[in-house]
Image: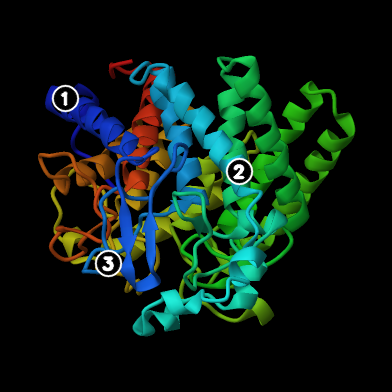
Amino acid sequence: MTFSVTRQQDPEFESWLEGQLCHSASAMLSSISPVSIVKHRPGFGQTVHPIAGAIVASPVLGGYDPDPDYFFHWFRDSAVVIDALRLLYVDRRVGDEALQHLRDFTRFSLDLNRLDGRAMAAVPDRRARVAPEFLQYLREDSDLASAHGEAVAAETRVNPDGTLDVARWSRPQHDGPPLRALALLRWVAGGRLDAPLLAEVNALIRFDIDFTLHHWREPSFDIWEEESGHHYYTLRVSAAALAESAAWLHGEGDPAQAQRCREESQAVLSRLNDFWVDERTGDRDATHGYYRSRRLPDDQPSSKALDIAVILSAIHSLGAEAAHGPADPRMQATLARLDALFDAAYPINHGRAAGRGPAMGRYAGDVYYSGGAYYFSTLGAAEFCFRVAALGGDAPWWLERGDAYLATVRAYTPASGDLSEQFDQRSGAQTSAKQLAWSHAAFISCVSARRIAAAACQGPLRQ
């Protein structure tokens, strides 16, 4: 990839970044505690009144008409959002309301741990409330009854009124608790939490640590909720959560648990080494190849082996380990392979303007809505480059590469600043869920990483 535009010296580009950041901050906040919105699901006989602390994936109501129904509290998405909220708070773009949001989120999350699907499954007329055409989407009693104790945290998503999701879905999913622990540990490290809030946050961190210790070896569904197996993303964020928890637990006076987390984190990282593959030779020690995103039961092949989820794992983890992070040459090789994949696959990438990077999707052959591109994928690639730049090396080149991805995001962002889940790989039109909280959170974290990279390069970016 070559670059011909130096955006660090482009006032118009800098102005767009600032304006979009302000809009993304406001838009993301609309997904946090959306208590004024009521969601009706007549097919399931449900009316959902959100409560404080819930974070919905999108505050724009849909029912696959054609936009999807994303009015759920996803464990993964909510962790990404609560971490981006921290960045806004540190940057003084959000005041003490951020601390109240964190308090509400923590209490909402702790309360979820007391849910028990056995009581819901035992309701005699549960199926009678559901429209006949929706019965095919209703969870079986046995599946619902399994949701209690630690299993609630593997539910993938819950209703924003704090009740269990009654629809058939891909469960279990194990990336939510470690990702949430990482976000909360960063809040704690900031040192601005009062004693009562700190106590509640600490309790939730301990729950998430225990969950991760107990379940990281077990198969679960991937980040896209499509295939069950062992997944790079889930394992990588688990390793990071355990490593960061080890340092925190040592400071909390719990050396035994700290040592256990440290050892388990290394065990996870060791397993991740087996995800490296060289398609030409099969030699896992080769310098060319990529980290595959998943290992399915009985080593079944998957068309989703090359997946942006691997890159997202590096920016969501941000641990101290050189391996499996932005500085890892194999991780950089994986991004290069993804670049080539989407550059060739997406019509909007063909003949693109100089200085623009490729719009990025999830994996080859994606058929969900437009099949990509995704805002959080393209922003994730940009943030990855900024993280590499901040570590030194060929920093100016990586900074420009990150800006090239951002230029593509700018090209397909309307003047309103609204960000959906996808922008069509052929037309660039926004598609899938509107005002996706993760898209806005990805922009916030990307711009934050860009500032860190610029400071490391001693560039002229606004600090």
Q: Which residue is mark 2?
A: 111
Disc 2: CA contacts within 10 A as few (<14), some (14-19) or many (>=20): few
User: How far apart are the alpha carbons under marks 3 and 1?
Assistant: 31 Å
Of badges 1 and 2, nearer the viewer stands 2
Q: Is residue 429 left or right of residue 83?
A: left
The residue type indicated by label 2 comes to Asp
Camera sees residue 44? yes
The residue lying toward the viewer, choosing from 12 and 92, is 92
Camera sees residue 230? no
Q: Position of residue 85 (x, y in %)?
A: 42, 30
The residue type indicated by label 1 comes to Ser
Q: Earlier in the sequence, mark 3 or mark 1?
A: 1
The residue type indicated by label 3 comes to Ala
Q: Give residue 277's quadrant in the image.
A: bottom right
Q: Position of residue 212 (x, y in %)?
A: 71, 50
As drawn, 447 above or below 78 = above
User: How far apart are the alpha carbons under marks 1 and 2?
Assistant: 42 Å
Q: Position of residue 342 (x, y in %)?
A: 31, 62
Residue 15 is marked as 1
Residue 344 is marked as 3
Dot 3 and dot 1 residues touching (CB under 8 Å): no
Q: Earlier in the sequence, mark 3 or mark 2?
A: 2
Identify which residue is drawn at 32% across, 37% down. Answer: 28
Q: Earlier in the sequence, mark 1 or mark 2?
A: 1
Disc 1: CA contacts within 10 A as few (<14), some (14-19) or many (>=20): few
The residue lying toward the viewer, choosing from 424 and 146, is 146
The residue lying toward the viewer, choosing from 451 and 338, is 451
Q: Is residue 254 left or right of residue 330?
A: right
Identify which residue is drawn at 46% across, 55% down. Answer: 159
Residue sitting farthest toward the right: 256
Q: Secondary structure at mark 3?
A: helix
